[in-house]
Amino acid sequence: MAINHSPDNESNENTRLYHPYQNYEVPIKAQYLYKLPTSPEFLFTEESLKQRRSWGENLTFYTGTGYLGGSVAGAAAGIFSGIKSFENGDTTKLKINRILNSSGQAGRTWGNRIGIVGLIYAGIESGVVAVTDKDDVWTSVVAGLGTGAVFRAARGVRSAAVAGAFGGIAAGAVVAGKQVFKRYAHI
């Protein structure tokens, strides 16, 4: 156990007392409580100055969120597509089969596409942050612009330019919306 050697047992604002046996009926004196910090701990002071995820966490977050969101949206669209494909005389079992096949196919397709968009976005955003050492609105706009251009590059220069412009505008709108939400919605 940790022994508290401080002369005063007053609570500091930067620490909190932790009693590992608080849920058990064990008589332990207050001097054996742990003083744990309330703020996150970092190995280096430079890490504490940067309030953002690492590139690996960014990559995992955007790719996973994109895949999950795309799969759910694709499955929802697939349900409607499956319902539209009903024919006269279909049994209930056949209708359910059509809905499941259609939603599974659309969910996989949409999930993969939007997951790849998240992967490209995370890579470009992390690269821009590494080069410029800034993480602001323009970083997200540049990452969105690059993501759109790279995602549609195989369809030609014109398609890549349009998709890049759309990606930059969409990323800027999301970041601006996030700032407005932080300012006006106190959660």
Image (tube, rainbow, N blue to C red):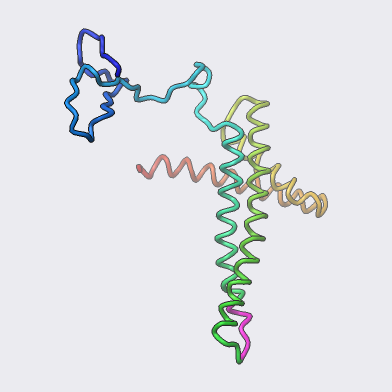
Q: Quadrant of residue 16?
A: top left
Compared to residue 35, the image places residue 172 above or below, namely below
Question: Is 24 on the left-hand or right-hand side of 72?
Answer: left
User: Residue 97 location in percent, x, y?
Assistant: 60, 77
Q: Quadrant of the C terminus?
A: top left
Q: Classify 146 as above or below 110.
A: above
Residue 15 found in image quarter: top left
Q: Is residue 35 above or below residue 171?
A: above
27 lies left or right of 146 = left
Residue 51 x %, y %: 50, 28
Residue most extreme to the bottom: 89
What x and y, as percent, mark residue 58?
58, 37
Outermost residue on the top side: it is: 7
Q: Main secondary structure of the magenta part?
A: loop
Q: In the rendered view, does 40 fall on the left or right side of 33?
A: right
Taking depth in this image into account, of 148 and 46 the one nearest to the observer is 46
* Quarter of the image where one finds residue 20: top left
For the point 42% across and 40% down, the residue is 182
Q: Is residue 32 magenta?
A: no
Instruction: Please provide percent x and percent y for residue 49.
Output: 50, 21
Which residues are the magenta region?
83-88
Which residue corresponds to the image point at 26% horizontal and 13% vertical from the top-left?
4
Residue drawn where x is 29% and y is 19% of the image: 1
Query: Which is nearer the eye, 35 or 127?
Result: 35
Q: Is residue 18 left or right of residue 117?
A: left
Number of marks in the image? 0
Viewer-proximal residue among 9 and 12: 9
